[in-house]
Image (spheres, grey):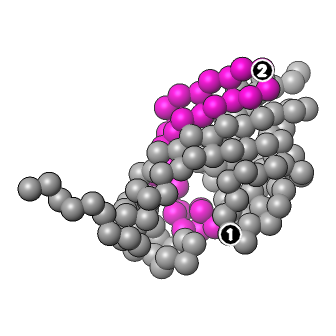
Amino acid sequence: MPVEPKELCRSFMEEVLGGGELDRIDEFVSPDVVEHEEVPGQPPGRDGVRAFLEMTHAAFPDFRVEIEQLLAEGDTVVIRSRFLGTHEGEFMGIPATGREMDMAVIDIVRVADGQIVEHWGISDTMALMQQLGAIEGPPAAA
């Protein structure tokens, strides 16, 4: 029985991304997935998704996802969530800081034939970099 796009995305977010079951990426992500939010040096396709998630989980071993809203229309799913974790390993050239991160994220995913085939994302990377101390945050209120 085919899984609805909304439930497929919920399972991917909870079990693979947030739950760390990276060995299950092949179940959810097409080999030829098109990633519109690549990080520098990320390989194309499913290998790129795998590399990014491995880097993320190595840097934030307690990485977790809190889904705040999940909307679906046809083959497209929109997920508004928070990514949380403790920075205990290098992440995108930033050495471990031991700091907590809490980043707002919006993902738009297109599903075909029971797999994720396309992804767009918007992440509050400015807040993430401030939380990790990579850039200075706004001045404190007086």
Residue 70 at x, y percent in the picture? 59, 27
In the figure, residue 41 lies in which quadrant? Answer: bottom right
Position of the C terminus, as image quadrant, is: bottom left
Which of the labelled discs sits on residue 72, or is there none?
A: none
Residue at image location 77% in from the left, 61% down from the top: 48
Residue 133 at x, y percent in the picture? 36, 71
Please report whichever mark, 2 or 1, sits nearer to the chain's N-terminal start.
Answer: 1
Which of the labelled discs sits on residue 40, or is there none?
A: 1
Residue at image location 43% in from the left, 65% down from the top: 129
- Dot 1: what SS? loop
Identify which amino acid the numbered label 2 is placed on.
Answer: Gly
Task: Name the residue at the left extreme.
Answer: 142
Q: Is residue 65 left or right of residue 127?
A: right
Residue at image location 52% in from the left, 55% down from the top: 63
Dominant SS in magenta: strand
In the figure, residue 132 lies in which quadrant? Answer: bottom left
Question: Number of callouts in the render?
Answer: 2
- Dot 2: what SS? loop
Write down the residue under mark 2.
74
